[in-house]
Amino acid sequence: MSKKKTAIIIGSGAGGAMMAKELQGRFQVAILEAGKDFRPFSGPLDQLSALRSTGLFFDERLIRLLLPNMQIDKTKDMVLVRGRGIGGTTTLATGNAVRCDQDLRAIGIDLDAQFEELYRELPITTSHQEHWSDTTKRLYAVFEEMGLDPVVTPKLLDTGHCIRCGHCAIGCPTGAKWDTRRLVDQAVEKGARLLTGCEVVRLERENDRITGVLARYQGKKVRFSADLVVLAAGGLGTPVILERSGIACQKTLFVDPVLCVAGPLQGFHQERELLMPFISQQDGYILSPYMDYLSFFFDKRWRRPMQDLVSIMIKLADEETGSTDGRHVKKSMTKLDSERMEKAVLQCHEILNRLGVPEDKHFPGTLNAGHPGGMLPLTAAEKDSLHNPALPENLYVADATILPQAMGNPPILTIMALAKKIAASL
Ligand SMILES: Cc1cc2nc3c(=O)[nH]c(=O)nc-3n(C[C@H](O)[C@H](O)[C@H](O)COP(=O)(O)OP(=O)(O)OC[C@H]3O[C@@H](n4cnc5c(N)ncnc54)[C@H](O)[C@@H]3O)c2cc1C
Ligand code: SF4
């Protein structure tokens, strides 16, 4: 029997896996993960594309037939994407490793030391630029001509093993893309226990302590307990567990809505490249080349061969106005969100025009989002403790739920830096 203090980590995505890796050794860690092993998409893309005209792909939730670890929720006007399985949503990420902690810095949280560690520990690189196709070079040149200041995206990537298949968001077939399954492996190698298919339902509380973690595991209701509990079930998972446990969250959900504007361009072959090879930072949103698989399969306007499409992504920092109760997610575009989106769409039209695609041929994709968070935001009052006073003393949240604001930017690196700081403070 170990005399070490024990810790339960709920979720193995960006925040949970980093907490597990950092805490194992100092604590005896158990990771409770609702999903199972991640399996990348491995079907015949050409044959499946041909099936689009049959109407088989009529609802985005059916994506689970192709990619079981992708979970879809739908709001009135948006499709929400998240990962369920070891590695969480990082397995579906496009590998972007962007530092975006300005909102945390603004409330007094300094993550310089944690980012330095991350840059030392992780394979973050821009060397993929040396292998860019002419298509990507052309896109980059158009962004430059328009004064959009494109910046080569730092990627969590082993460039030598990248075959530029463009499948980053549906699972990397070669392992070239890094995701947090590697951190889970490190924690397990050091002695952590990993329980998959273990869905936490709620927490039991006595006075100011969490005394039990109630979960569904192997068809039974199971109760776990530990000295420390870390909740990292993601921006849509964590608030639900908290609310079921009698701890109220705020209706401040953000999601970073994404819209792609596309057009036909014969033989352009944008799909033969990493997704989001470079990013243009604009006021409240980013622009980047991105082949949108959801729209490609489920949006009738996208029924063309992928090689003959060009697609530019807009990713918006939305106003924090949403919420979830576990069954439904409430999230709509506000007036400001829509105004920003319209401005960005005009820029996309200009990019496509300059690539030679006439404006009457442009079409948008499905409005979707994959960066949920913000329902228990950190404030300046918690800059030292990193612990919301509404939480019992032995319960911490370490995922996108505690980010203060929408970033409109890839959040994995920042969530991991924050998790490192929380782990160091325990
Ligand atoms: C298609 C796509 C591409 C993306 N690309 C990038 C990118 O390139 N770079 C970037 O920085 N960000 C990217 N993101 C966003 C990024 O992946 C997420 O913001 C990030 O992973 C969130 O981390 P998290 O720890 O909050 O939650 P997650 O990574 O979602 O992890 C939550 C974990 O909790 C588990 N879980 C949920 N409920 C329970 C429960 N009740 N019990 C037990 N376990 C539970 C889930 O299975 C999951 O493993 C992308 C997102 C999508 C959808
Ligand atoms: S483009 Fe490279 S990193 Fe992306 S899925 Fe293909 S091999 Fe993996």
Image (cartoon, grey):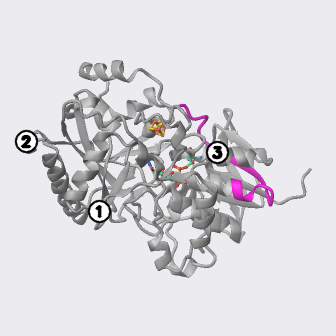
Q: Position of residue 226 (x, y in %)?
A: 77, 56
Q: What is the three-letter code of the residue carrying label 1?
A: Asp
Q: Secondary structure at mark 3?
A: helix
Q: Is residue 36 left or right of residue 64?
A: right
Q: Which residue is mark 3?
A: 182
Q: Rate crowding at label 1 as few (under 14), some (14 to 19) or many (20 or more) other CA atoms within 10 Å.
A: some
The image quarter containing residue 204 is bottom right
Q: Image point 45% across, 39% down: which residue? A: 168
Task: Give the residue displayed 40% in from the left and 64% down from the top.
Answer: 407
* Residue type (three-letter) at the residue carrying disc 2: Asp
User: Would the CB of label 2 be found within 8 Å of ligand 1?
Assistant: no
**Left or right placement of residue 353 versus residue 137 in this view:** left
The mark tally for this picture is 3
Q: Nearer the viewer, mark 3 or mark 1?
A: 1
Choose the circle earlier in sequence order: 2 or 1.
Answer: 1
Q: Would residue 407 appear left or right of 115 to someone viewing this image?
A: left
Image quarter hosting the C terminus:
bottom right
Front tag of 2 and 1:
1
| Residue toward you, 221 or 227 | 227
Q: Picture coordinates of residue 120 (x, y %)?
A: 63, 60
Q: Which range of residues does the magenta coloring cover?
A: 21-39
Q: Which residue is mark 2?
A: 360
Label 2 residue SS: helix
284 versus 312 height, above or below: below
Q: CA distance from mark 3 to mark 1?
A: 33 Å
At 54% from the left and 31% from the top, the residue drawn is: 39
